[in-house]
Amino acid sequence: MKRTLYGAFLLITCLFLCLPEGLAQEAAGPRIEIEERVFTAKKVKQGELIEHTFTVKNKGKEVLEIRKVSPG
């Protein structure tokens, strides 16, 4: 019983000491932000051209590379 309590106390102490520092750091690398992830065209006549623009932003510190895009 004492061993379990000691382990739980140690775990909680480590979380309190390490968690605020981990939350304060921003993740390195690119971070994608897409406001509208899905577009539904509803009814479209055969042969009709559909056009839609998605806004993609990089909120990270490094270059964001989009290597592949495909319809859903």
Image (cartoon, helix red, strand yellow):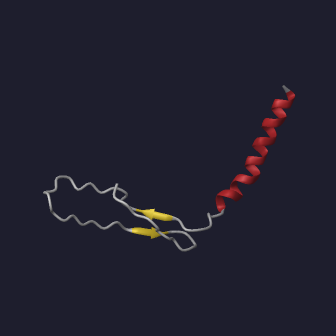
Image coords of residue 43 (percent x, y) = 16, 53
In-image side of 62 versus 22 (left or right): left
Q: Quadrant of residue 61?
A: bottom right
Question: Taking 42 as reference, is 1 above or below it?
Answer: above
Q: In which quarter of the image is the C terminus?
A: bottom left
Decide: is 15 above or below 23: above
Farthest residue toward the right? 2
Q: Give the image location of residue 44, x and y in percent.
A: 16, 56
Q: Which of 64 and 34 is in front in this view?
A: 64
Locate residue 7: give its quadrant: top right
Residue at 78 percent of width and 47 percent of height: 14
Q: Going by the image, does 4 lie left or right of 40? A: right
Using the rendered view, name the quadrant where residue 35 is placed. bottom left
Vertical placement of residue 58 versus 7, above or below? below
* Quadrant for the N terminus in the image: top right
Residue that extends furthest to the top in the rendered view of this protein: 1
Residue sitting farthest toward the front: 47
Query: At 34% from the left edge and 58% from the top edge, which residue is drawn?
Result: 71
Residue farthest toward the bottom in the current orientation of the protein? 63
- Identified at 30% across, 68% down, the residue is 53
